[in-house]
């Protein structure tokens, strides 16, 4: 999707994410219990992102299968859950507050812009879909089941495995901090 209507902060959301990750890793004070709990939550977010990436054909067909049957933005939902897991692992309350502020400040406007773009691309089909399926927080059985299955080739095309590699790297840094840098 184009970012013509996006604000500068929305266009720089990925670099801002890397900046937040650096701040996060510097100030995190993880302990083994927070790492375990946060890790489980982060993996759930990662799995949601992976599931979503195998159901989306960007700007070609309207994604309504898999997690898109429950939320219009499962990739962002997965990112949010992933971030919640990281902030729990960090064990520092203000990092959680910073994460929520950044996430809401960046991704809520992005979701609105993308909804407008999808309306332009898919018209009435998207409008009907948007009436049934919530923007962010999932609703069980919001949309009818689709016959479309997860496509691993899409997962690879969108390089969603990079999120898993990032998670492994960040968790390794947090584990070192928890065990050796108290």
Image (cartoon, rainbow, N blue to C red):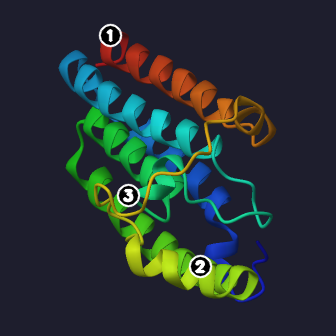
Q: Quadrant of the N terminus?
A: bottom right
Q: Is residue 14 above or below residue 148?
A: below
Within 10 angstroms of label 3, few (less than 14), some, or many (20 or more) residues?
Answer: many
Residue 103: x and y in percent read: 43, 64
Res. 8 image quadrant: bottom right
Disc 2 designates what residue?
126
Give me the C-alpha separation between circle 1 and circle 2. 49 Å
106, above or below 167, in the image:
below
Q: Residue at x 68, y 32 (%)?
A: 162
Q: Residue at x 28, y 52 (%)?
A: 96
Q: Secondary structure at mark 2?
A: helix
Sequence-wise, the earlier of marks 1 and 2 is: 2
Reading the chain from its start, which is encountered first: label 2 or label 3?
A: 3
Q: Give the residue drawn at x 23%, y 26%.
A: 37
Asked if 108 appears above or below 16 in the picture, the reply is below
Residue 164 appears left or right of 27:
right
Q: Quadrant of the C terminus?
A: top left
Disc 3 from disc 1: Cα separation: 24 Å
Q: From the viewer's perspective, is 14 left or right of 2?
A: left
Check residue 179 in the rendering and tell me which mark sits there, or answer none. 1
Residue 13 position by quadrant: bottom right
Residue drawn at x 67%, y 37% as measured from the top left: 160
Q: Which residue is mark 3?
A: 99
């Amino acid at each position: 999707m184009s970012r013509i209507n996006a604000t500068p902060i929305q266009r720089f959301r990925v670099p801002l994410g890397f900046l937040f990750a650096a701040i996060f890793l510097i100030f995190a004070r993880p302990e083994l219990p927070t790492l375990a709990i946060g890790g489980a939550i982060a993996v759930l977010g990662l799995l949601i992102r992976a599931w979503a990436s195998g159901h989306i054909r960007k700007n070609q067909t309207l994604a309504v299968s898999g997690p898109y049957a429950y939320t219009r933005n499962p990739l962002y939902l997965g990112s949010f859950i992933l971030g919640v897991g990281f902030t729990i692992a960090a064990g520092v309350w203000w990092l959680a507050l910073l994460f929520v502020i950044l996430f809401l400040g960046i991704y809520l406007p992005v979701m609105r812009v993308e909804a407008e773009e999808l309306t332009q691309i898919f018209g009435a089909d998207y409008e009907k879909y948007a009436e049934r399926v919530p923007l962010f927080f999932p609703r069980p059985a919001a949309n009818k089941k689709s016959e479309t299955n997860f496509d691993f080739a899409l997962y690879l095309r969108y390089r969603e495995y990079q999120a898993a590699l990032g998670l492994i790297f960040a968790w390794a840094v947090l584990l070192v901090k928890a065990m050796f840098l108290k």
